[in-house]
Image (spheres, rainbow, N blue to C red):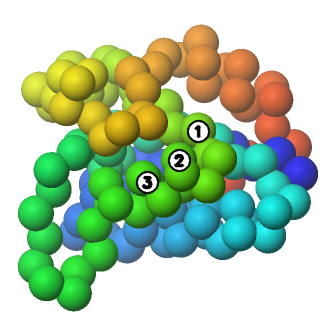
Amino acid sequence: MKYLMILNDAPYGTERSYNGLRLARSLLKTGEAEVKMFLIGDASACAKKGQKVPQGYYNTGDMLGMVVRNGGEVGVCGTCIDARGIAADDLIEGASRSTMDQLTAWTQWADKVIVF
């Protein structure tokens, strides 16, 4: 099954993006799922590399890295990172600057779209 997960919330402050990342990792672990993640709005900051969080706290950059290493794809809204002063080379390895055209194509590709 092919899943598109769209994250909207900031990396910290609520747990919506965290829970979306948890689900993506769990789906990929089954070995039967293809996962693409699109980060839009405040969720674009989830892909910023070099995040420093308190000991024992989750790190969305690290979690996205796990998604990528397990075969998932990560696109980050280019307009959204521009608005937040995040350059494409500030993104974690494996995440790419993306567009609404890509989100459209991924939405058409997916069997299921899940929004957090």
Q: Amino acid at mark 3?
A: Leu
Give the side of residue 45 with respect to residue 9, left or right.
Answer: left
Do labels 3 and 1 touch, CB within 8 Å? Answer: no
Label 2 sits on residue: 68
Q: CA distance from mark 3 to mark 1?
A: 9 Å
Point 28% across, 35% down: residue: 91
Q: Position of residue 68 (x, y in %)?
A: 53, 47
Point 29% across, 75% down: residue: 58
Give the side of residue 27 with respect to residue 12, left or right.
Answer: right
Label 1 sits on residue: 73
Q: Position of residue 25 (x, y in %)?
A: 60, 66
Q: Earlier in the sequence, mark 3 or mark 1?
A: 3
Label 3 sits on residue: 64
Do labels 1 and 2 touch, CB within 8 Å? Answer: yes
Q: Amino acid at mark 1?
A: Glu
Q: Position of residue 50 (x, y in %)?
A: 15, 50
Residue that protrudes farthest toward the top in the picture: 101
Q: Secondary structure at mark 1?
A: strand
Q: Residues within 10 Å of mark 1 (few under 14, many from 20)?
A: some
Give the side of residue 97 with respect to residue 69, left or right.
Answer: left
Q: Amino acid at mark 2?
A: Val
Do labels 3 and 2 touch, CB within 8 Å? Answer: yes
Q: CA distance from mark 3 to mark 2?
A: 6 Å
